[in-house]
Amino acid sequence: MSSDNTYILGHTATEMVRLTEQDRLITMGMDGLLPELPDLAGIKRVLDVACGPGGWALDLAQKYQHLQVLGIDVDGGMIDYATAQAKAGGLDNATFRVMNALEPLDFPDNTFDLVNARFLAGFVPQNRWSQVIMELRRILRPGGIIRWTEQEWTGTSSSFEQAEAYTFQAMRRAGQLLAADERNVGITPLMRRFLSDAGFRNVREVAHALDFSAGTGVQRAYAQDLWMATVLLQPFHLALGVATQQELDDLQQRVQEESLADDFYAVWFLLTDLGTKP
Amino acid sequence: MTRLYQMDLYEIGEGRVLPELADEQLADTHRVLDLWCGRGEWVMATAQAHPEMQVEGIDTNADFIEAARRQARLASLDNASFRVLDPLHASSIPDGSFDLVNARFVVDFIPLDSWSLLVREGLRLLRPGGILRLTEGDSPITTSPATERLSALLARALWLAQRNLDPPTNNGQGLLVTPKLGRSLRDAGCLDIQHMAFVTNFSAGMPAHAAVCQNLATVYQESTPFLLEREVTTAEEVASLQAQMLEDAQAASFNAVGFYLTVEGKKP
């Protein structure tokens, strides 16, 4: 794959809708935009890497008007949407640019006070991690903070578990899986190591759990996310030859049924690593 | 069978217990009970950190209780006590005896279909407004292929064992215990249900490395008969995986995290 289309969920309007809703759920589940950094002293210039439709960056700019928030994403459609949202909301302090986090970034050294990144594992090839993290370090000022979040999912849907298994197999074939086996993406055990190896100091890790089991009030919203993800991953599954169209069609049907069932249980663990550039 | 992953061992060793309770909640917490207390690690750490509390542990294993009592005596912990009792049938303890009932990493002691029984009994032992506190983890995630394979085998064996009790809702890839905690408290009518997620990084060089790797080695050692009984592996494979796991865990490149979840609810 060339380096501008490694995102396993693809670039579609449906993915834009999914990411917008997912962003809302995550911020709600984490109890805020920057729950680990209640004190924003010394933070003015913020970069959101792989910002998608810009939900987090826009909310941050809205809530903290003294911040200058910039979002970058490889997908021009996402950036156009985010830019239009900023304009519609009258947010002069939120801007967006098309930029690929796998390439050298078009910013001078020491530009940002805070670099935020969520779910990089969806597009970073296995052998590019250190380069990506080093580049984020370069554009942070000394004393600047990286805030990086990845995820693990556990739930009672055998069909979503199967969809994940296909995803991990396909990621393995595409050179995008870090895990020792194919039961998870394998990024969470490595985040601290990657940050330390890139020279970040005072690395700390904070976990959040989002429960979206039946009876929690957010089951339907998350079920929609799981179902849309399963549908959007189909081209990736097919391209890497891990399942047939028929198998995938049956699967997405079952994901929808199971995730809306009365006996559905699921927890989404989010791991956020924070580190300081010396 | 053995107790499964105890991802909080390092935290407990450092005296970090009940991190989520606010001062006013702690002030209302005097009588604490730990179900399946094992050798009493949590009870003793809590008794030490909170001398104002009376902390009791119960377990069905008389050897564990004896060891726990010995340790408490050595540490001169007058506010820690232990007795041999089955937490699912603790009718000798009167209703409403405790302000907080704790159960951590007990999934292996109770079949998953007994969660409702555990929650019911825990609530009976609490005063109204008292806190039921459950903590469980899923399989840890490591960069060691042998460790991952052992975790997968154990998850698979547990899934096969539970399949007869409960229709399977997954493919046996994970333990699937954390998602059920909140639901079991909701179904029992608990109020103010809170989720607190934790992560222990036990990579090479991290302070938790030794304690958690030791725990994993014990878990996989002691669960070997169970893995063989469920026919998910062979004696040769499991022995070789265990040896490889120990070697991997000592490598400087070993990276690992374990997520765990504490869910609390109040008795109405």
Image (cartoon, rainbow, N blue to C red):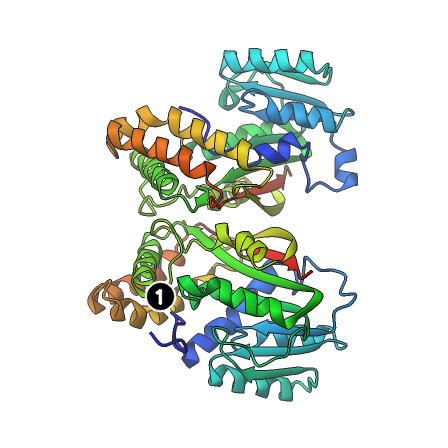
Q: Is residue B149 in sight in this rendering?
A: yes
Q: Mark 1 belongs to which amino acid?
A: Thr
In the image, B2: left or right of B99?
Answer: left
Left or right, residue A131 beside residue A251: right
Label 1 residue SS? helix
Q: Nearer the viewer, residue B220 or B56?
A: B220
Q: Provide the residue designation for mark 1.
A: A230
Quadrant hosting residue B232: top left
The residue lying at 42 percent from left, 47 percent from top is: B143
Taking depth in this image into account, of B191 and B224 the one nearest to the observer is B224
Give coordinates of residue A8: x percent, y percent: 38, 69
Quadrant of the snapshot with the N terminus of chain B: top left
Q: Quadrant of residue B28?
A: top right
Camera-side residue: B166 or A179?
A179
Task: Identify the residue shown where x is 63% and y is 53%.
Answer: A203
Q: Position of residue A225 (x, y in %)?
A: 44, 66
Q: Is residue A180 above or below residue B123?
A: below
Would residue B108 be visible to someone looking at this image?
no
